Image (spheres, rainbow, N blue to C red):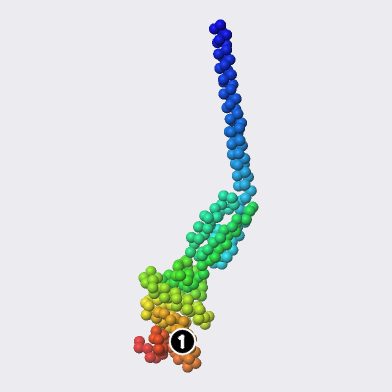
Amino acid sequence: MRTKKHVRKNTVVKRGKWSHLLITMKRFLFVVLPVLLVVSLGYLLFVSAKSAFVVRKIVFSGNAHLSDDELRGFAGLKGGENLITLSSAAIYEKISASPWIRSVSVRKEFPDRLIIRVKETEPFALLDMKGRLFIVDERGKMLERLRESFMPFLPIITGDPFGDREVFSEALRLVRAIKETGLMERKNRIEVIARGLNELAVNLDGLVVKVGAGEYEDKLSRLAELEDEIENRHIPVDYIDLRFANRVVVKPVNEVIR
């Protein structure tokens, strides 16, 4: 009797083990295996996509002052990037960090093209600060230091924007008026001397014109009329003073006390 009971007990234990093993196999087949298949399939798709969507052509547009290689360097593009993993936001932030860039747009064209359009900041004037020349935009922001011997024809502002911001802002307004009145087209060299609001002056091909602050369009209009008269009368002029509302002071060379 004891032997039969022992056999029966072993049979029950074996059945319990097989039942537990069967449940484990079912869980593996219906839960773990599908997850593994999905993960494996996702990995295969990722690997195939990574090799399939490699950037083979980068198209830049809108750049005139910056070269394609410079923009590529700003964007941190070294070649072999993938369109799927490449971050358009990161490219935007990196290129926008350049003072030459006003706006950027980045577009992906599958399977292998990256389109980058930029709008550059236009050079507005040259800043002569203690003998060093800087290209500045219309807001006075420094774009870069001019190191080459070639100098683009832009009005030069001589002064220190960090010493007196108000004077520098007035100098920028004067440059804008000079451009709008077409004075640049008639002169070879224009230098705005920004040492003080009342002392604001402009050197036009060697002729010093004291302008002062404000009413630049009106003052430059009076200057144009005066230049015609001076040219017709062949008067050698040392400087012209336009700071007074109701009169213009013209100092001939021979009247200047040295």
Figure quadrant of residue 131: bottom left
Residue at x 55% of width, y 55% of height: 88
Q: In front: 189, or 74? A: 74
Residue 208 visible in the snapshot = no
Residue with the mark numbered 1 = 222
Q: In front: 145, or 26? A: 26
Placement of 117 over or under 168, stated as above or below: above
Element under label 1? helix
Q: Position of residue 137 (x, y in %)?
A: 48, 70
Which residue is outermost to the top? 1
Q: Where is residue 167 in the image (x, y as percent from the top left)?
A: 39, 74
Q: Position of residue 179 (x, y in %)?
A: 50, 78
Q: In front: 36, or 197? A: 36
Q: Position of residue 110 (x, y in %)?
A: 63, 53
Whether residue 250 sits left or right of residue 3 in the image: it is left
Which residue is outermost to the bottom? 233
Residue at x 59% of width, y 21% of height: 18
Placement of 242 over or under 162, stated as above or below: below
Figure quadrant of residue 9: top right
Quarter the N terminus occupies: top right
Residue at x 61% of width, y 32% of height: 30
Q: Which amino acid does label 1 sit on?
A: Arg
